[in-house]
């Protein structure tokens, strides 16, 4: 299916690895030019080389700490107008409310919550002025099914879901769509490391980590490509009637 994205420009954060990198690869395959932002310059360079060799689109990289508002403003100035924003940067650690220090909580939210808010604010202004654009906020299923041992992440994801619903209901008046995507149980490098640790605890063998996915309704974990497929589809005009909602990509786990 042609998604009619050729020639558009997308900014993807957290694009050096995992879901962000997968989204960048698929957007490039559809002919989008890219701005990729993350903290690790070497990983960004690797992503740029891989994407340009495969798809021949323009790829600009921006190695910045997106927890700092000043860097957001700098990033927007470097990118110029974009048609698509995929907010994906940030991972909040697992901890209970008594284990989480105020410093750690704020650090996690500065990137995952306020980072999304600040970048959306800057990009949204420009999109409204041009009367077109799509913003995708990659949150997470813990916003739907909060966990006490992931309380800061659960609350942060819920906040991003609410922002997407509220903004997306109004943004369409200006020709802009806003949607949240909640991945769950996806085989990213970070998730795999966590599952390997859990497999050592359960089975005494970290190589058995995929067995834990067999308890899910679909009998496995999801892939980065499966999440990226949904995000890129939502970026396209094929989803022109979708805004102010949350799409869950977890193989039915949160509904089970």
Image (cartoon, rainbow, N blue to C red):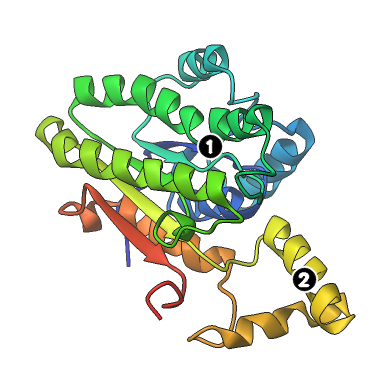
Vertical side of 173 occupied by 22: above or below: below
Residue under circle 1? 112
- Tell me how far mark 1 sits from mark 2, CA to CA: 24 Å
Judge whether residue 145 can be spotted in this image: yes
Residue 109 spot, x, y in % from top left: 54, 33
Residue under circle 2? 198
Q: Quadrant of residue 16?
A: top right
Vertical side of 221 occupied by 105: above or below: above
**Image quarter (top left, top right, bottom left or bottom right) of the N terminus:** bottom left
Precedes in sequence: disc 1 or disc 2: 1
Q: Which mark is residue 207?
A: none
| Eye-nearest disc, 1 or 2 | 2
Name which residue lies at 29% across and 20% down.
Answer: 126
Residue 65 spot, x, y in % from top left: 65, 24
Vertical side of 162 occupied by 18: above or below: below
SS of the residue at dot 1? helix
The one of 233 and 138 positioned closer to us in this rendering: 138
Name which residue lies at 72% across and 58% down.
Answer: 189
Residue 247 spot, x, y in % from top left: 33, 60
Residue 176 spot, x, y in % from top left: 21, 36
**Image quarter (top left, top right, bottom left or bottom right) of the C terminus:** bottom left
Dot 2 crowding, Cα within 10 Å, few <14, some 14–19, many 20+: some
Dot 1 crowding, Cα within 10 Å, few <14, some 14–19, many 20+: many
**Quick check: 18 left or right of 13?**
right
**Quick check: 138 left or right of 105?**
left
Name which residue lies at 39% across and 42% down.
Answer: 160
Residue furthest to the left in view is 173
**Quick check: 194 left or right of 123?**
right
Residue furthest to the front in view is 98
């Amino acid at each position: 299916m042609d998604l009619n994205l050729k020639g558009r420009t997308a900014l993807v954060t957290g694009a050096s690895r995992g879901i962000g990198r997968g989204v960048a690869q698929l957007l490039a395959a559809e002919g989008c030019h890219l701005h990729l932002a993350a903290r690790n310059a070497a990983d960004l360079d690797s992503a740029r080389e891989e994407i340009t060799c495969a798809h021949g689109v323009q790829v600009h990289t921006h190695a910045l700490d997106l927890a700092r508002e000043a860097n957001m403003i700098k990033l927007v100035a470097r990118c110029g107008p974009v048609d698509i924003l995929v907010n994906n940067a940030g991972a909040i650690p697992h901890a209970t409310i008594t284990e989480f220090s105020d410093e750690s909580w704020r650090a996690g939210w500065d990137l995952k919550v306020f980072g999304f808010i600040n970048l959306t604010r800057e990009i949204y202004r420009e999109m409204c002025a041009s009367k077109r654009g799509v913003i995708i906020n990659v949150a997470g299923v813990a916003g739907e099914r909060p966990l006490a041992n992931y309380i800061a992440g659960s609350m942060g994801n819920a906040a991003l879901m609410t922002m997407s619903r509220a903004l997306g209901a109004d943004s369409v008046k200006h020709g802009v769509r806003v949607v949240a995507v909640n991945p769950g149980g996806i085989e990213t490098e970070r998730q795999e490391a966590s599952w390997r640790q859990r497999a050592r605890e359960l089975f005494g063998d970290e190589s058995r980590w995929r067995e834990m996915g067999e308890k899910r309704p679909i009998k496995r974990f999801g892939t980065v490509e499966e999440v990226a497929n949904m995000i890129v589809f939502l970026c396209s005009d094929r989803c022109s009637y979708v805004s102010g909602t949350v799409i869950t990509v977890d193989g039915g786990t949160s509904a089970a």
